[in-house]
């Protein structure tokens, strides 16, 4: 039976926690595939992130891929940046756009749930995919 582990500090960040669970679930799914991912064994983790996007968790991964925030304590004030996962925001959004195109999932449904700075990027990527209709056609669900 698979065991999913996580950092308990993520309990205070539900977006990152769900992204972690999705990534770990994707690890389990990828373990059922025969052979290595495209690009070889060193691409296991990025392929796992892509799998998590393609099982419907792209918003969680994109929103938690990079966070930048101000913090303060009794003695310190500053800025903190954190990355999570193996793919950057733009690659995750591109995977989301492709996922929506292939599955027929309405990409606009993701917009209200994406961080504000990611929304225009997803819109641009979806628009760019409009020119790839023939290339993507054989990969579409039900083709």
Image (cartoon, rainbow, N blue to C red):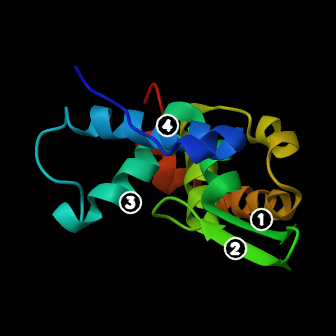
| Upstream in sequence: badge 4 or badge 2 | 4
Earlier-in-chain disc, 1 versus 4? 4
The reply to whether residue 40 is visible in this rendering is: no
For marks 1 and 3, give the one nearer the viewer. 3
Badge 1 local density, few (<14 within 10 Å), some, or many (20+)?
A: some
Tag 2 near tag 1, CB within 8 Å: no
Q: Position of residue 48 (x, y in %)?
A: 37, 49
Q: Are marks 1 and 4 in contact (CB under 8 Å)?
A: no
Q: Secondary structure at mark 4?
A: helix
What percent of the width, then of the height, locates residue 65?
61, 60
Residue 74 visible from this viewpoint? yes
Pointer 3 or 2: first along the chain: 3
Mark 1 sits on what residue? Answer: 121
Q: Which residue is mark 4?
A: 22
Which residue is label 2 attached to? 81
Q: Nearer the viewer, mark 4 or mark 2?
A: 2
Q: Where is residue 13? Give x, y as percent.
A: 70, 44
Crowd around label 3: few <14 · some 14–19 · many ≥20 (10 Å): some
Query: What is the x, y in percent for residue 37?
Result: 23, 54
How crowded pointer 4 is (Cα within 10 Å; few <14, some 14-19, many 20+) is rated as: many
Mark sitting on residue 46: 3
**Residue drawn at 19 percent across, 32 percent down:** 32
Q: Secondary structure at mark 2?
A: strand
**Splitting the image into 4 quarters, where does residue 115 fall?**
bottom right
Front-most of residues 63 and 4? 4
Badge 1 or badge 3: first in the primary sequence: 3
Q: Residue at x 35, y 54 (%)?
A: 47
Look at the numbered discs 1 and 3 and tell me whether their residues touch, using CB distance below 8 Å: no
CA distance separating discs 2 and 1: 20 Å
Q: Which quadrant of the structure image shows residue 101? A: top right
Q: Along the horizontal axis of the image, is 138 left or right of 80? A: left
Q: Is residue 138 above or below residue 88?
A: above
């Amino acid at each position: 039976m698979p065991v999913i582990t996580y950092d308990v500090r993520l309990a205070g960040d539900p977006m990152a926690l769900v992204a972690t669970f999705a990534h770990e679930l994707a690890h389990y799914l990828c373990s059922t595939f025969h052979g290595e991912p495209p690009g070889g064994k060193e691409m296991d983790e990025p392929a796992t992130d892509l799998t998590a996007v393609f099982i419907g968790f792209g918003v969680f991964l994109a929103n938690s891929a990079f966070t930048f925030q101000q913090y303060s304590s009794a003695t310190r004030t500053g800025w903190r940046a954190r990355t999570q996962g193996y793919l950057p925001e733009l690659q995750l959004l591109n995977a989301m756009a492709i996922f929506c195109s292939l599955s027929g999932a309405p990409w606009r449904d993701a917009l209200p749930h994406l961080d504000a700075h990611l929304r225009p990027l997803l819109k641009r990527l979806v628009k760019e995919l409009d020119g790839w209709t023939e290339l993507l056609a054989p990969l579409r669900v039900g083709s």
